[in-house]
Amino acid sequence: MMLSQSMKKNKTGRIREKSPLLDLILYLVMALAILACVLPFLYIIAMSLSSSNAILNNRVSIWPIGLNLESYQQIFAYPNFFRAYRNTLTYTFFGTLISLTLMILFAYPLSKPRLKGQKLVMKLVVFSMFFSGGLIPNFLLISSLRLTGTVYGMIIPFAINQFNLIILINFFKSLPEELEEAARIDGLGYFGILLRILLPLSTAAIATIGLYTAVFFWNDWFYGLIYLDSSLYPVMLLLRNIVNGTTMVGEAGGVGEKASVAIAVKSAVIITSTLPIILLYPFLQKYFVKGMLVGAVKG
Amino acid sequence: MQNTRDLAGPGKARPSGLRRSFAIHWELYLMMLLPLAHLIVFKYLPMFGNILAFRRFKPLTGPYGVSWVGLRYFNQFMGMADFWRAFSNTLTLSVTNLVINFPIPIIFALMINELRHLRFKKFVQTVSYMPRFISTVVVISILTELLSPSSGALNRLLRSITGRLPVYYMNEQQYFRPLYIITDMWQYTGWSAIIYLAAITGVNSDLYEAARIDGANRFQQILFVTLPSIMPTIMVMFILKVGHLMSLGFEKVLLMYTPSNSMVSDIIDTYVYRMGFQSSANQYSYATAIGLFSGIIGLILVTSSNLLSRRLTGESIY
């Protein structure tokens, strides 16, 4: 909150006089930064769309040569790819839903510093950010709860993220108390206040942590690796297995002509698995940044 | 009305017991029930599960082991050359990474702040934050393709310029640390710059005005106005980073790990992973002991750096 106010003030505040040398350096560095972010993707897109002949002869740079969709046809004809994609969609959708529900229910009581016991629970939350069970105890717990090899094992253990929770708590704290008082007088209980008054006011904050959560579930591969059987693998784990050669797709994984098909196919998997994030990112970017700033203001 | 007074209202909370609080605010406690249970089960039970480090594990008998063995596993790993290699690899990689990748977002933020076209500035920011949201698997997959000895862009480029033979960068150990650091730079420079940009926008513009009147050019303004003004933020961020020296991007290291670069790429987290999941006998207790050891060092680093931050700058995060 504080930060965004001061941001406006400064917009008109300072005069940046022309300084040709400095400006030249600035724009050069910025152009390089933009290229560094964009070029790798262009290269992979070009690879995924080029003919195997062009790849084999090393003619592809950032523009597709011998444009064709063969690699995409190959991965779409590959049943494991669809299954992995569907798995990822399931984990992301239900993971985000459950995660948001639990975190909203947790954040509201924790945003009341005068509630008895709030401080203790808050301490428990914060301590668990800095000390954890570690890899093996976590794994043994999940497997003794019989969550390994199930969809739940990919969703439930990760429902509460302490950083996101604190973002939400801070947001609830920043809402004016008078709102709640008025609602109390009208006879609403805490559940009613949360549902009808606070949630409609918190869409931006919830969108922010919802996005972080969704990105987490979308990008996860490691827990899939240690908790799941291959039929439940998310798409990121499939990608990792294709790239390191554990899994072969179609004709992929040979020499010469076949090796260049493999490159095109790998590239197509990279692109299809990242596309949702790249496509949504420009529209949702402001929510991402908001969360970073709210979270950075002390909790 | 009375209830509101207690929590939401501006009035002072009256002395009341937990039981009274339960009676009045039962709805809030009810709300917490499920998430709190989640916190205890999924965060605190594994924490408690660390006692496995002092106990012998037997399959199918639950996560807490069957009999006490004292410090046997600690003594065991303390005597292993592999462990000490992983320990020093962890510190080397994270310290090098800190030295290189700590200043870069600051410089980047200072440069973004000097851009005079608002729209271009926004565009640069948007593009540079994006890598933070790309999966590490994708980042390493792209890297693997770019560096591939047969078809990778870098090898092709170098061959066409210098005629040198292709190098298998992902497999050779001298390239592991540079590649880890460069990908970190790619992933997080823009994102980490946000916090400094926010601090920069808080700088009082009168300071620039005064500096200008004193004849400072823009470069001097950056050096003598902007940079000193965001020094407290830089200090806090630095101390926090030091607190997290034990935690590297484990998933990324695991993705980049190959037997041929293991001399430098085996860090504590991957060592724990290998001992727990990839060794023939699933040495759970042994791996837990190492994880606990590293977790405690991490905890000490975080708490002491936070304390230091509070002393020095009056700011702390926790």
Image: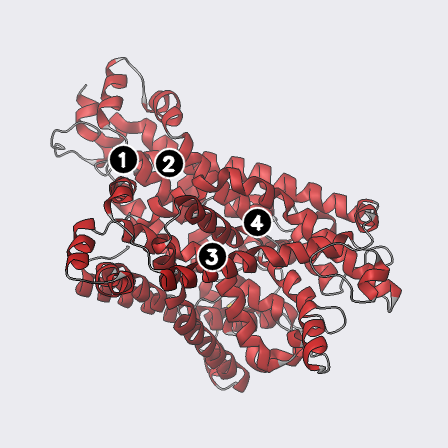
Label 3 and label 1: CA atoms lie apart by: 33 Å
Q: Point out residue B32 in the picture as x, y percentages from the top left corner.
A: 37, 36
Query: Is the C terminus of chain B in the top left, top right, bottom left or bottom right quadrant?
Result: bottom left
Q: Is residue A48 above or below residue B245?
A: above
Residues under labels 4 and 3: Cα distance? 12 Å
Say which residue label 2 marks: B32
**Chain of the residue displaying label 2:** B
Q: How far across and down, in percent of the image, does residue B301 sit?
A: 33, 69
Q: Earlier in the sequence, mark 3 or mark 2?
A: 2
Residue assigned mark 4 = A145
Which one is in front, B98 or A221? Answer: B98
Instruction: Compute the Cα span from label 3 to label 2.
Output: 21 Å
Report if residue B226 is visible in the image: yes
Q: Give the crowd class for mark 4: few <14, some 14-19, many >=20 residues within 10 Å.
A: few
Q: Which mark is residue B57?
A: none
Which quarter of the picture shows residue B57? Answer: bottom right
In terms of depth relative to the viewer, which is nearer, B145 or A132?
B145
* Residue that mark 3 sits on: B46
Residue B226 coordinates in the image, percent (x, y): 25, 59
Q: Label 2 is placed on what type of residue? A: Met
**Quadrant of the rendered structure where residue B153 is?**
bottom right
Amino acid, disc 3? Pro
Distance of mark 2 from mark 4, alpha carbons?
22 Å
Q: Is label 4 in a helix, a strand or a loop?
A: loop
Q: Amino acid at mark 1?
A: Ser
Q: Residues within 10 Å of mark 1 (few under 14, many from 20)?
A: few
> Considering the numbered disc 3 on the image, is that residue within a helix, a strand or a loop?
helix
- The chain to which mark 3 is attached is B
Along the line of sight, the residue nearer the viewer: B24 or B164: B164
Q: Secondary structure at mark 2?
A: helix
Callout 3 touching callout 1 (CB < 8 Å): no
**What type is the residue that disc 4 sits on?**
Leu
